Image (tube, coloured by chain):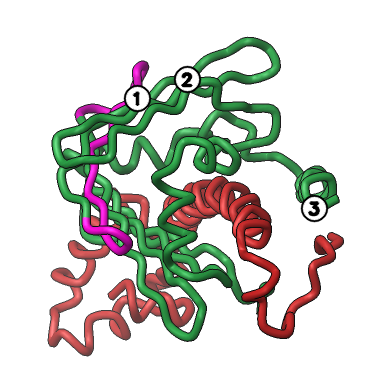
Chain colours: A green, B red
Amino acid sequence: MNATNTVTVTASGERELVIARSFNAPRSLVWDAHTKPDLIRRWLLGPEGWTMPVCEVDLRVGGSYRYLWRNTKGHEMGMGGVYREIKAPERIVQTEKFDESWYPGEAVGTLVLTERGGVTHLKQTMLYESRDARDAVLRSPMESGLSVGYDRLDALLASMAR
Amino acid sequence: MLRSLAGGERNLSELARPFNMSFPAASKHVRMLERARLVRRRVVGRTHICRIEGRPLARANRWLEQYRRFWETNYRRLDVLLEELQPESQSTPRSRNQEPRKS
């Protein structure tokens, strides 16, 4: 079952990216993992070598969130935004903007969680201000660690699973 | 036209036929696609053979794949975390192996 849980990313229309994946866990847990700082900072890290020293979440409409990542060389990357809609445990709409953004404007992310038979399906839609902004996100090396080899990833998972 | 070319090389009259286009009109259309670097044309005798130019499309796919891998890295970590958060009592007979996958 786990093997079928792979991410799909689709460019939709001119300004959207849609990220979809299933998780073998109840929706409430997937919700927690997206809204509780202690849990967020354990997985939303990007490539290996990054940690999240700052993770602040004010989970209410109009409340803001702030993430800051740091890598082993001391490079930092910050991002934050405001919650526009919150419907626990199924839907969040939030704005997002990086401190040193490489794409113009703000993006709006919509997270939708649905559960069926103990499996939670996640759909994250990112809406950018323009086609150029959307394409810039795709072009960005996402901090180049994307080349993180799967062997290294396996090692990481092994150490986490103990 | 692009859909037709996705199936392989086509000459100009083959490309024009479904649209009832004249040869010059089809040629003009192909020229636009050439400018957008989506199509390449070569001339063999009197035949203009066109094929799809894969590079820009391939590049777009590569970007998507990079971005996808970025999220896959995150979500595999999330899998491990979710597994850990599930109370043992609720874990109905495990249908999956908890061993991390080997590459």
Placement of the N terminus of chain A among the 4 image quadrants: bottom right
Label 3 and label 2: CA atoms lie apart by: 27 Å
Q: Is A157 on the left or on the right of B22, as rendered?
A: right
Image point (50%, 47%), residue name: B67
Mark 1 belongs to chain = A
| Disc 3: CA contacts within 10 A as few (<14), some (14-19) or many (>=20) | some
Above or below: residue B12 compared with residue A44:
below
Q: Secondary structure at mark 2?
A: strand
Q: Which mark sits nearer the N-terminus, 3 or 1?
A: 1
Mark 3 belongs to chain = A
Name the residue that disc number 3 marks.
A161
Label 1 and label 2: CA atoms lie apart by: 8 Å
In depth, the one of B5 and B10 nearer the eye is B5
Q: Residue most toward the top?
A: A74
Q: Is B59 on the left or on the right of B17, as rendered?
A: right
Callout 2 amino acid:
Met
Name the residue that disc number 1 marks.
A98
Callout 3 amino acid:
Ala
**Start-end of magenta stretch:** A87-105
Name the residue that disc number 2 marks.
A77
Q: Is B57 on the left or on the right of A80, as rendered?
A: right
Q: Which mark sits nearer the N-terminus, 1 or 2?
A: 2
Comparing labels 3 and 2, the label whose residue is closer to the camera: 3
| Disc 1: CA contacts within 10 A as few (<14), some (14-19) or many (>=20) | some
CB under 8 Å between discs 1 and 2: yes
In depth, the one of B75 and B55 nearer the eye is B75
Q: Secondary structure at mark 1?
A: strand
Callout 1 amino acid:
Phe
Where residue A14 sits in the image (x, y, percent)?
21, 53
Q: Which mark sits nearer the N-terminus, 3 or 2?
A: 2
CB under 8 Å between discs 3 and 2: no
